[in-house]
Structure formats: structure tokens, C-alpha cells
Image: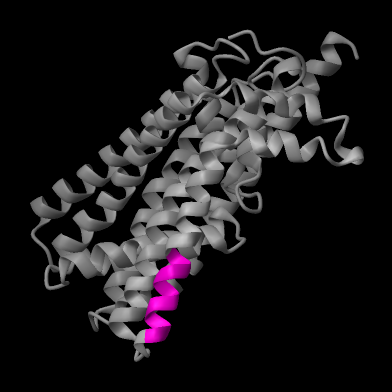
Amino acid sequence: MTKQQKKYLNLGIKFAIVGLATWFIVSKVNNQQNLREFKSLLQSIDPWIVRGTLAIVVVMMLMNWAIEVVKWKYLSRRIEIISWWKAIKSVFCGLTWAIFTPNRIGEYGGRILLLKPRSRARGAIAMGVGLFAQLVLTSVFGSLSIAWFVSTYLPTPDSVKFGIWLLAIIYALAFVVLYFNVYWVDYLVGKFRFLHKIKPFFSVLDDFTTRELLHVLLLSLLRFGIFTSQYIVLMLVFLPELPFISMVLMIFILFFVQSALPSLDIFDFSVRSFVASNLYSYITTQEIAVMAIVSCIWFVNLILPAIMGSVFVLNVNYVGDNKS
């Protein structure tokens, strides 16, 4: 392929990604009834409190993705040493790709394409370790919170409650054990002949020490704490009557269900809103307010970063090496 052809192909890919992302964002935000409900909710609160609260939520979003940048740079360091600027571009490009791909699969492509071609496959495996760390936390907190929810709000015999708690604990421990023995995946891949060609890429899993995995898990815990706090801040302002412990544990259940269901990021608000409205109906009658809050978080955490990422998408070289 000539230099000129590569140039035009690059331009075509860039505009296709940005065009798709823009179309998805505009069409869904315009049809998002819950965001309009959130605007109505704002009118009942002092404007300065509203501005301060939204500013805190946006700053938390930036902190959240800043920690992900740190985590990505840490995970990729044995595969390819990347600059902080390149790590930032990688993360935000991935967010733009994720917005219109099922189960955020595009986040892998958007992120690893900024690595050198020979590093991309192993980079995807390393990135998977970071995402798995996040899933471990969601699964641990979510499964235990579901056991609490069933025991607290559903009429269940004591024997069944005991069984549910036991299953939840086993489920949570299984995720923790698998995470700290992530090299098992490399071993399992080697057991299947049809996977032998890709097995060398999984060898990167053998390189992670327990200390490194713990470091990644702690960074993921920081992120988990931040996006949990976003919900807490909004709910304390707009629904101050909610019992605090129940409110927090239901947030964990919301994260768990959301991670378990296949969906597009752009349609994710529908899943979140439905789950949230049903969960919180046990502790409040303000279901519209709950859905409005969930939609606000969806917009701040996914739509705003995707818009920011579209700027970086235009600066990426999709054909050939990425030098910057």
C-alpha cells in the first residue's frame, strides 16, 4: 500500500469512527427521557448546590479515568513502554470505540491500536487483566449485596437465606482465587490444540506476580470507590431520605447486574434505569428521581469521555506504527 493510500485509509477509518460515535450519541441523548427528568429534578434544588454537585461528579469522572490511565500504563509496561500522553490517548480512544460496540469490545481495539503491531495481541491480554480486576470487585461486592437484599427484603426461609449467603461467598471467593492465579488461563489455553497459535500471547499472564496483581486490584478498587461515590453524592442531594447502607448496597447490585448483562454502552442507560427503579422501589417511591440520577451518571461517565475520546481518535495512525 502506498503512502498516499495509507493516508486516505487512515482518514476514512477516523471519520467512520467519529461519525458512528456522534450518530449514536446524538440519537440516544435526544431520545433519553430520563435525562429530561433529571433537568426537571434540578429545578427543585438550589442552583448553587446543583452546580457544585454536578461539578463534583464530573471531577470524579476525570479522576476515575485518570486512575485507569495509570493502571493501563502499569499493565502495559512489560509489553511496551508508553508515555503518559500515549496512555491517555489509548484510554480515551478505547472509550469512543466502546460506545457503539457490544459489551465494550471496541475498547480493546481502540486502546491497543496505539501500541506497535507486534505488541497489540499481548497488550489486549494485559488489558484483560485490568478489566478482570474490575470484574472481581463488581462480583464480590455485588454477590454479597444480592445475598443481603434477598435476606432483608424478600420473604425467604432461614435455610434458603443460609444457602444464598453460602453461594454468594463461594462465588466471591472463586473470583478472587482465579484473579490471583490468572496464569491458569495460559495453562488452559495450552490444553486446546486449536488455540496453540495464540497461546504465545497468553504467556504474558505468567509474568504477573501476586504483588503486581494486588497493585492492579487496588487501583481498580479506587475506581470502584469513585464511581460508587458518584451515585452516593447525587442520591444524598436529591434523595436525602434514603437509608444510607441500603442505598450503597443497592448500588453494588446495580453494578453487578449491569456487568452480567450483554449490552451496548449507548443502550446501557436502559438496563441501569430498569434495574435501579425496581431495586430502589423497596426503599423509596421516587422511582423517576432514581432513574434520572442513573441517567445523569451514564451521561457523565460514558458519553462525556466518548466525546473527549473522539478528539484523540482523529490523531491516531490506524495504518502502521504509532510513534507518539
Q: Is residue 287 above or below residue 67?
A: below
For the point 14% across and 46% down, the residue is 52
Q: Is residue 151 above or below residue 122?
A: below
214 left or right of 107 in image: left
Q: Nearer the viewer, residue 218 or 3?
A: 218
Range of magenta residues: 159-168
Q: Quadrant of the N terminus?
A: top right
Q: Inspect this view and state whether residue 30 appears.
A: no
For the point 54% across and 15% down, the residue is 77
159 left or right of 309 in image: left
Q: Nearer the viewer, residue 101 or 280?
A: 280
For the point 21% across and 43% down, the residue is 55
Instruction: Find residue 38 and report its horizontal and vertical position in percent.
Output: 29, 65
Instruction: Find residue 101 and report its horizontal and vertical position in percent.
Output: 65, 49
150 left or right of 105 in image: left
| Dominant SS in magenta | helix
Q: Is residue 164 magenta?
A: yes
For the point 56% across and 35% down, the residue is 129
Q: Nearer the viewer, residue 61 or 261?
A: 261
Give the image quarter of residue 206: top right
Give the image quarter of residue 35: bottom left
Q: Quadrant of the C terminus?
A: top right
